[in-house]
Image (cartoon, rainbow, N blue to C red):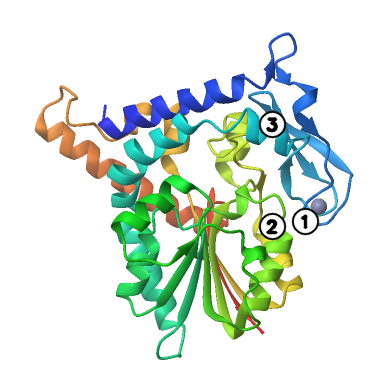
Amino acid sequence: MHISTLRWEEFYGLLAQQSNRLIDPSTGKVLEQWVHTIACPICGSADYTLRVFRSGFQYVTCNRCALVYINPQLTQEAITTVYNDEAVRKFFFEQLLLPFVERDQQPEFHARARELRSMVSTSQPRLLDIGSAAGNFLLIAQQHGFIGEGLELNELYLDFINKNRKLTVYNKLLEDMKYPNATFDVVTLWDVLEHLPQPCQTVAEISRILRPQGLIALTTINHRCFNEKILKERWRYYTPPDHLCSFTPGVLKNLLNQCGFTNVTIRHHYMFEVLAEHYFRFALPPSERDSVNLFIKKAKKILYLLLTRGSEAIMNTLRSGDLLTVYARKD
Ligand SMILES: [Zn+2]
């Protein structure tokens, strides 16, 4: 098994331990003292249907707008006092983000920065990256000609940036920055929207601080996908309490249109390994330590590449990928 796979497994184990502290062992549900019931964070409706139950939490589907969200949700007190383990965050940062995640993000981040730069006509475009982590995308965006700055609430990342990277990243919520109208040409949120308690307010605020014809670019999760249909509560992206909600292309398009964005482009990314992990482990690529001969190793890697690329093309055509990349322009 790859070292990174082992570290991910260890990390998921730590997360499970962390959320177990919130669970009542007699019911398997989160203790009532730590949660409160909410209305749909997109349309405000209180009318919902239970969708799946996972790790003590329930994800519900809004009967009006089709958003999937955790309900009831953790109170702020539960997040601050119980579900906020410094050791878990440190493990992710040191054992996964710096050695593996940032490395794996490089090609994709370069492609996104290049594409966004080609869509903006300003000579020195200003970019805001919300949820910058350790600043990997901001560094790459600068290489592609953007004047970038970021927002990040995790102090471990901020501390690392201040010591090691020449970047401007603030420890603040977007709403607290009080940027003037029409400040930025591009605002990015990579894997952020599903963690936000009020995604509507955030997108509206982004619209306000973008210049006319400015771009919002984001990636997020899509429960209206093939893998969720097959796997139900075992779908990889149901990770309570971290993923607060999950979208569909329609929900996103409506949300963006309401906030003044048009020309919404949505690309689907199908995660072949999500299904393979459960049903065809034999199809997963072998690691360096697997005791199969070199020819079989190479053949399996080629097969895996073909399956991932081929299935991604099919799911993009069927509009049924687990992950979505979304670009939209402000009117
Ligand atoms: Zn709704």
Say which amino acid is labelled 1.
Answer: Ile
Q: Secondary structure at mark 3?
A: helix
User: In the image, which is nearer the foreground, mark 3 or mark 1?
Assistant: 3
- Look at the numbered discs 2 and 1 and tell me whether their residues touch, using CB distance below 8 Å: yes
Sequence order check: which comes first, mark 3 or mark 1? 1
Quarter of the image for residue 53 reads top right
How much space separates mark 2 and mark 3, taking CA atoms? 21 Å
Mark 2 packing: few (<14 Cα in 10 Å), some, or many (20+)? some
- Residue 27 on image: x %, y %: 75, 13
Q: Which residue is label 3 attached to? A: 78
Instruction: State the residue at coordinates (72%, 54%).
Output: 198
Say which amino acid is labelled 3.
Answer: Ala
Q: Which residue is label 2 attached to? A: 199
- Look at the numbered discs 2 and 3 and tell me whether their residues touch, using CB distance below 8 Å: no
Q: Secondary structure at mark 1?
A: loop
Position above or below: 235 against 259: above
> 51 or 203, which lies in front?
203
- State which quarter of the image contains the N terminus: top left
Q: Which residue is label 1 attached to? A: 42
The CB of the residue at mark 1 lies under 8 Å from ligand 1: yes
Q: Secondary structure at mark 2?
A: helix
The CB of the residue at mark 3 lies under 8 Å from ligand 1: no
Mark 1 packing: few (<14 Cα in 10 Å), some, or many (20+)? many
- State which quarter of the image contains the C terminus: bottom right
Residue 315 visible in this rendered orientation of the protein = yes
Mark 3 packing: few (<14 Cα in 10 Å), some, or many (20+)? some
Residue 280 visible in this rendered orientation of the protein = no
